[in-house]
Amino acid sequence: MDPPGPGPARRCQGHPGSPHPHGTLMNKTRLPAVRERRYPSDTTDAEWAVLEPLLPVPACELPTGGRPEKHPRRNVVDAIRYVNDNGCKWRAVPVDFGIPWRTVYGFFQRWRGSGDLARIFAELHQMVRVHDGLNPRTVAVILDSQSVKGAETVGQDTRGFDGEKLINGRKRHLAVDMRGMPLAVMVTPASPHDSIPARDQLFRLRLAHPELAVAWADSAYGGTLVDWSHSFLGITLKTVPRRKDQDGFAVLAKRWRVERAISWIMRARRNVRDYERLISHSEAHITWIFITLMARHLTRPPRPPRTTPHPVEPVKAASKPKPIRLRRIQPQTIRLTPAALP
């Protein structure tokens, strides 16, 4: 691929310490050629066409000004996805990306802290739904959590012990729509019961998605949480219990969609165990996985709607013939007021 050529002249504001604080007229610098795609985590041309317009505007193009970026952003995104997919350390970023590891980590941290990563995540979710012929805003979600072990880099103040799963680490709380596309990600210590951080998760969902009306979850989200979500948030929370004869894991109605999304998280080796010192960085790594997933989804033909229900899903009542009920209509008695009498 040919390197991007020089663009029209523009004025980039000087950065602190620059000899030209009021800005200098310069031509757009020629960035190095985009490297050859050689890793499975690299972006394809179609994926980059989806992601590039969603990235934040470079600092030198903002009114506040800044230094022009030295490295192509596609190489930066590929390096972040490489770390996420292969689970290596930031210091172990391959040299063929042509970017120092501190620069890659700087972009990762800056986009996460500025909220641009969450914005890209939300916009891609709406684009995926429109791509599949659905309303961009969903009214139903499915909730679930996953406990993962924490490495020695995870501090005691951000980790806990899950007595049910016997895991010392953190817990990931996930919300997906009815097609399994991720909607919200939250990471907490593993010690609290699912119903406690679920209040914070549902509250965030209500703020970001006012149209949300119903949510499905397992029995751990039942009890007082059902009444609380209906009274304070206006969300109808329904639980999907385990089967009476269930022994171990089983595919259950509604819940299989969020279980599949959790399996997508585990495909990236960085997320097999939690290594991050900050909870916000753990959420960012999971967000990058779903950004990659949704970008690839947008490069493929739309997924046709399912013509037959899933084997574990109950058959809708609309497909069954409705019973005919015969009611005897009682004659209505007309009463006249005293003013209407002669």
Image (cartoon, rainbow, N blue to C red):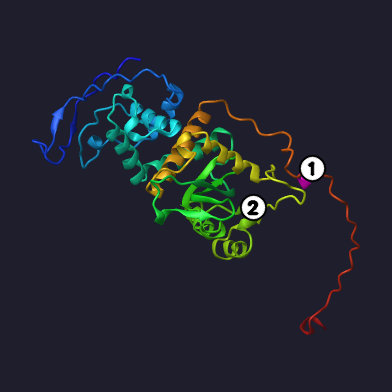
Q: Residue 72: x percent and y percent? A: 30, 26
On the rendered structure, is 6 left or right of 221?
A: left
Is 316 magenta? The answer is yes
The C terminus, quarter of image: bottom right
Residue pictured at 72% horizontal, 46% vertical: 247
- For label 1, the residue is 319
The N terminus, quarter of image: top left
Front of the two marks 2 and 1: 2
User: Does any portion of residue 183 appear in the rendered image?
Assistant: yes
- For label 2, the residue is 218
Q: Residue 197: x percent and y percent? A: 51, 57
| SS under mark 2 | loop
Q: Are marks 2 and 1 in contact (CB under 8 Å)?
A: no
Front residue (pair 128, 1): 1
Give the amino acid at mark 1.
Ser
Front residue (pair 89, 12): 89
Q: Residue 24: x percent and y percent? A: 12, 32
Give the amino acid at mark 2.
Asp
Q: Which residues are magenta?
A: 315-319
Q: Residue 23: x percent and y percent? A: 13, 36
- Circle 2 packing at 10 Å, graded few (<14), some (14-19), many (20+), is some
Q: Residue furthest top?
A: 2
User: Does any portion of residue 179 appear in the rendered image?
Assistant: no
On the rendered structure, is 214 left or right of 56?
A: right
| SS under mark 1 | helix
Q: Which mark is residue 102?
A: none
From mark 2 to mark 1, how far is it between C-alphas?
26 Å
On the rendered structure, is 193 left or right of 310?
A: left
Vertical position of residue 61 compared to residue 154: above or below? above
Q: What is the quadrant of residue 94 in the picture?
A: top left
Vertical position of residue 146 compared to residue 265: above or below? below
Give the total number of marks visible in the rendering.
Answer: 2
